Structure formats: structure tokens, C-alpha cells
Image: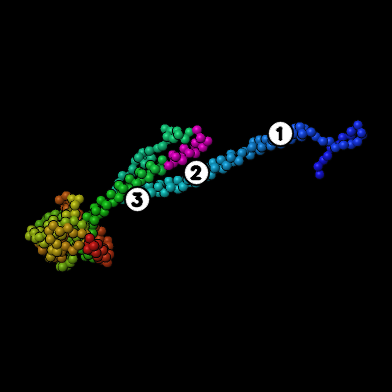
């Protein structure tokens, strides 16, 4: 209910309702507005001082989100750095030692990103330190990835070289390892045929006639023929890297001169041709033309089954080529 105001009219001693003039009404209205606005400004200022403006709140929320994203990105980067580091460890601890490669110098792997301030463009921000740390980490990661990538390329190249060397190395027994070894690389007081003292340059293996003789590494047949002086029917395979393998006293030669052979290929059958008193294989390895102890090149400590499996594996691989 609206309040009404009355006044005592002294002219007729009666109470009468107060009626305001238009001017007064307007004045009241203006005062009322001014008061309301003053109160609104007062409270709004008070509120903003304590809680900030809605725009500020929005911005601060956005900054919070960005910071969160930064810290997530940071965590991801730490994980990536860990992965790159474990690749680096495999590189240094496994691949390089196996392939006889030198380790990469630390200065090359870790050129260092301290010293000169590389990110001056990030100065003057509220979160400059955080942003700079992040950028440093990214630079570090980029460098590590590029170094590691290059290193793996080198390792890959070296691996194929190494595989080539390994395939060519005369590294297996030329016959089934069940056969006993005879005379090795040594001075023989009495040569079985000549009857005089002489150096024996090969490794004899006591095999019966017709035993299969295999190429001990990939290479090229550089000689295949008969030598009446000593080896009888013989084959020489050149493996590269200064290494040649010689197979003597054969009863039959299965490969022609100039043929490229793979490890495990049948090259002949054993016999007793040349300077020999009974069937055996004379197996010799020359390094840069000098005979060297052949027994050091193969491991005879495998079973007959293992050897046969190995030969079959080599031969099936050889057919695929
Ligand atoms: Zn011999």
C-alpha cells in the first residue's frame, strides 16, 4: 500500500493530502536514480576488487588452461626424451660395440643449450621462465632426434657392411663336424709322403672318400683344378678382405673357376689326390697370401644335426637368391 502524506491546513483546520508539484516529483526521481547508481557503483567496485571482473575471470581461466596444457606437453616431452634416451642407450651399449664402432662424442650428442639466451622474444611475460624452459626442451629434443637419426643411418650402413663381411668370412667347418680333426697348422717332423720335416699350413680333417665338402663363406672360386705337387684336386675360394680358403686332396670338384659361391654350397667331394697317404681333407686359410691357422676360423663345437641344419639353411637361402 502506498504511503500517503497529510498536512494540517491552518486555514480551515483540516488535514489534507500532500500533493507534490511536478518539479518536486522530478527532483525526487532524479535523486532516486542518482542514489541507485551510486549504490550500484559502490558495490560493483567492491565486488571487482575482491573477485575481479567477469572478463578478468575468463582470461584467468584461459591462462589456467594454457598452463595446464603446458604442463601436459611438458610431461609428454619428458616421456619422449626418455624414449629417445633409451634409443641412445641401445645405440651406445649394443649396436656400436657389436659393430666395433666408436661411440659418438658427448659434445656432439649434447651441444648444450645454456649460455646465450636464445629465446629473448619470450622475455617480459608473466610466465617467461616456463615458456623458455619448454622451448629449451623442444630444442634439446629436436637435436637429440636428429643426432639419433643420423647415428642409426650410420649403424644401418655399417650393419649391411658387417653382414657382408660376416657372410664372406670362412666361418664354418668345411665338412660335417662329426669327423675328427687331424694335423693342424704346425711344423711336422716327418711329412707323411715326403718323409722330411716340413711346415703344415692347413687343418686336416679325417674324412672318408666322397665326403661332401662345403664352401665355408661366400666368395668366388679363383682356382679349381689339379696340382700334382701337393693339393691334388683342389679349390680355392676368395672371400675378399684378404681371405682365401683352400680345399685339397679332393676326389671330385663340383664348382668351376670364377663361380660365385655362397656359404654351404657343395664345392667337391673328399679324396686322397696329390700328396696324401689316405683320404682326408686339407683345409687351409690364407690371409693376404700367408697361411694362417684355419682352426681359429670355425667352431667345431656343434653337433652333426646342427651342422646339417645349418648347411640346409644356407643352401635354401642360396637357392632363393
Ligand atoms: Zn694337410
Question: SS of the residue at dot 3?
Answer: helix
Going by the image, does 66 lie left or right of 34?
left
- Residue at mark 3: 94
Magenta stretch prevailing secondary structure: helix
Residue at 51 percent across and 37 percent down: it is: 127
40 and 124: which is toward the camera: 40
Question: SS of the residue at dot 2?
Answer: helix
Q: What's drawn in magenta, residue-wise?
A: 124-138
Residue at 87 percent across and 36 percent down: it is: 16
Which-is-in-front pick, marks 1 and 2?
A: 1
285 part of magenta stretch: no
Question: SS of the residue at dot 1?
Answer: helix
- Residue at mark 2: 70
- Residue at mark 1: 34
In 3D space, how far apart are the residues under numbered discs 1 and 2 (Cα atoms)? 48 Å
- Label 1 vs 3, first from the N-terminus: 1
Which-is-in-front pick, marks 3 and 2?
A: 2
Amino acid at each position: 500500500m502506498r504511503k500517503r502524506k497529510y498536512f494540517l491546513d491552518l486555514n480551515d483546520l483540516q488535514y489534507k493530502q500532500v500533493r507534490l508539484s511536478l518539479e518536486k516529483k522530478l527532483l525526487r526521481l532524479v535523486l532516486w536514480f542518482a542514489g541507485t547508481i551510486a549504490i550500484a557503483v559502490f558495490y560493483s567496485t567492491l565486488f571487482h576488487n575482491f573477485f575481479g571482473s567477469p572478463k578478468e575471470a575468463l582470461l584467468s581461466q584461459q591462462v589456467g588452461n594454457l598452463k595446464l596444457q603446458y604442463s601436459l606437453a611438458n610431461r609428454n616431452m619428458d616421456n619422449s626424451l626418455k624414449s629417445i634416451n633409451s634409443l641412445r642407450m641401445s645405440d651406445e651399449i649394443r649396436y656400436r660395440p657389436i659393430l666395433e664402432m666408436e661411440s659418438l662424442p658427448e659434445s656432439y650428442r649434447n651441444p648444450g643449450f645454456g649460455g646465450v639466451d636464445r629465446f629473448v622474444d619470450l622475455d617480459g611475460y608473466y610466465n617467461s621462465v616456463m615458456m623458455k624452459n619448454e622451448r629449451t626442451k623442444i630444442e634439446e629434443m629436436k637435436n637429440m632426434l636428429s643426432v639419433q637419426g643420423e647415428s642409426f643411418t650410420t649403424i644401418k650402413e655399417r650393419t649391411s657392411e658387417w653382414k657382408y663381411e660376416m657372410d664372406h668370412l670362412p666361418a664354418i667347418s668345411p665338412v660335417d663336424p662329426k669327423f675328427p680333426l687331424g694335423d693342424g697348422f704346425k711344423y711336422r717332423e716327418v711329412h707323411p709322403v715326403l718323409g722330411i720335416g716340413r711346415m703344415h699350413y692347413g687343418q686336416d680333417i679325417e674324412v672318408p672318400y666322397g665326403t661332401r665338402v662345403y664352401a665355408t663363406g661366400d666368395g668366388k672360386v679363383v682356382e679349381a683344378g689339379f696340382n700334382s705337387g701337393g693339393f691334388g684336386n683342389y679349390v680355392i675360394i676368395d672371400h675378399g678382405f684378404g681371405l682365401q680358403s683352400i680345399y685339397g686332396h679332393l676326389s671330385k670338384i663340383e664348382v668351376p673357376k670364377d663361380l660365385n659361391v655362397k656359404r654351404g654350397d657343395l664345392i667337391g667331394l673328399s679324396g686322397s689326390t696329390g700328396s696324401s697317404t689316405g683320404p682326408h681333407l686339407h683345409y687351409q686359410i690364407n690371409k693376404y697370401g700367408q697361411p694362417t691357422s684355419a682352426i681359429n676360423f670355425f667352431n667345431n663345437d656343434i653337433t652333426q644335426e646342427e651342422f646339417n641344419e645349418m648347411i640346409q639353411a644356407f643352401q635354401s637361402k642360396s637357392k632363393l637368391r
